[in-house]
């Protein structure tokens, strides 16, 4: 990483920082803190806010999980975030994304590939939002016809949130993954 990782316990523990570390550990259980956490914990208050936001995006959304994971994987590919891809591609498959679709996303050949209508809308939204920031009105209308206003918001915050994550991961080279090849996960 381009800066050292923060320690896995607060160097100057206070009740506030101990509580923050405890909340982040609780979200990660049964796993230990991950490198992303240790990069963020240089500022425990920022790490705490990040943990709350991303935890809500991951666990409190009504948007279909498979489509959310597909969007996250597409963000990873578009931004060259190997660590994000490596973490989320297996989750996408477990959530129900077809392996063939994930391969098309990884190869940047999903247009014209065997993607369903919902998958295509999510991939197009993710690409426009990530690369252009502005999403075309026509696409937004299609999303609003297909999903509730809440779900359109949840897709939007998922794509925006994981763009934040990927940019943080790549800028600091968290896990020293920059320049490595993104690979499809082993078959489940």
Image: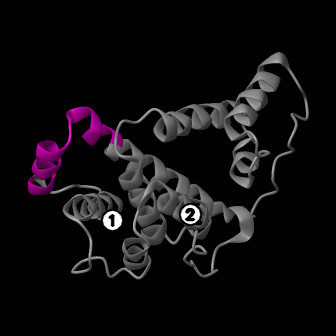
Graded by Cα atoms within 10 Å as few (under 14), some (14 to 19) or many (20 or more), the crowding at tag 1 reads: few
From the viewer's side, name the closer residue of 43 and 84.
Answer: 84
Determine the residue positioned at 57% across, 79% down.
183
Say whether marks 1 and 2 touch (CB < 8 Å). no
Q: With 126 as the anchor, is 185 left or right in this view?
A: right
Q: Which residue is mark 2?
A: 90
Q: Main secondary structure of the magenta part?
A: helix
User: How far across and down, in percent of the image, does residue 151 sit?
Assistant: 28, 38
Q: Is residue 124 magenta?
A: no
Determine the residue positioned at 75% across, 35% down.
25
Q: Helix, strand, or loop for circle 2?
A: helix
The C terminus is located in which quarter? bottom right
Q: With 59 as the anchor, is 160 left or right in this view?
A: left
Q: Helix, strand, or loop for circle 1?
A: helix
Q: Which residue is mark 1?
A: 131
The N terminus is located in which quarter? bottom right
Q: With 98 as the anchor, is 11 left or right in this view?
A: right
Chain-order first, disc 1 or disc 2: 2
Q: How much space separates mark 1 and mark 2, taking CA atoms?
A: 24 Å
The residue segment tinted magenta is 138-154
User: How far across and down, in percent of the image, does residue 155 sit?
Assistant: 33, 46
Determine the residue positioned at 11% across, 44% down.
145
User: How far across and down, in percent of the image, does residue 114 sit?
Assistant: 26, 76
Q: Residue furthest top?
A: 15
Above or below for 184 versus 139: below
Determine the residue positioned at 22% across, 60% down.
121
């Amino acid at each position: 990483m381009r800066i050292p990782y923060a320690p896995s316990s607060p160097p100057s523990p206070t009740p506030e920082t101990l509580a923050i570390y405890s909340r982040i550990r609780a979200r990660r259980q049964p796993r230990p803190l991950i490198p992303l956490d240790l990069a963020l914990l240089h500022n425990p208050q920022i790490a705490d806010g990040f943990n709350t936001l991303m935890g809500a995006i991951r666990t409190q959304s009504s948007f279909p999980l498979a489509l959310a994971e597909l969007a996250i994987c597409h963000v990873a590919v578009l931004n060259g975030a190997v660590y994000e891809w490596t973490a989320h591609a297996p989750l996408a498959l477990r959530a129900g994304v077809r392996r063939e679709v994930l391969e098309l996303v990884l190869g940047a050949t999903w247009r014209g590939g065997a993607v369903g209508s919902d998958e295509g809308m999510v991939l197009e939204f993710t690409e426009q939002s990530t690369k252009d920031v502005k999403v075309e009105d026509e696409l937004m209308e299609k999303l609003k016809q297909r999903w509730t206003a809440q779900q359109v918001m949840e897709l939007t915050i998922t794509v925006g949130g994981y763009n934040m994550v990927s940019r943080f991961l790549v800028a600091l080279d968290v896990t020293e993954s920059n320049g490595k090849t993104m690979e499809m996960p082993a078959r489940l």
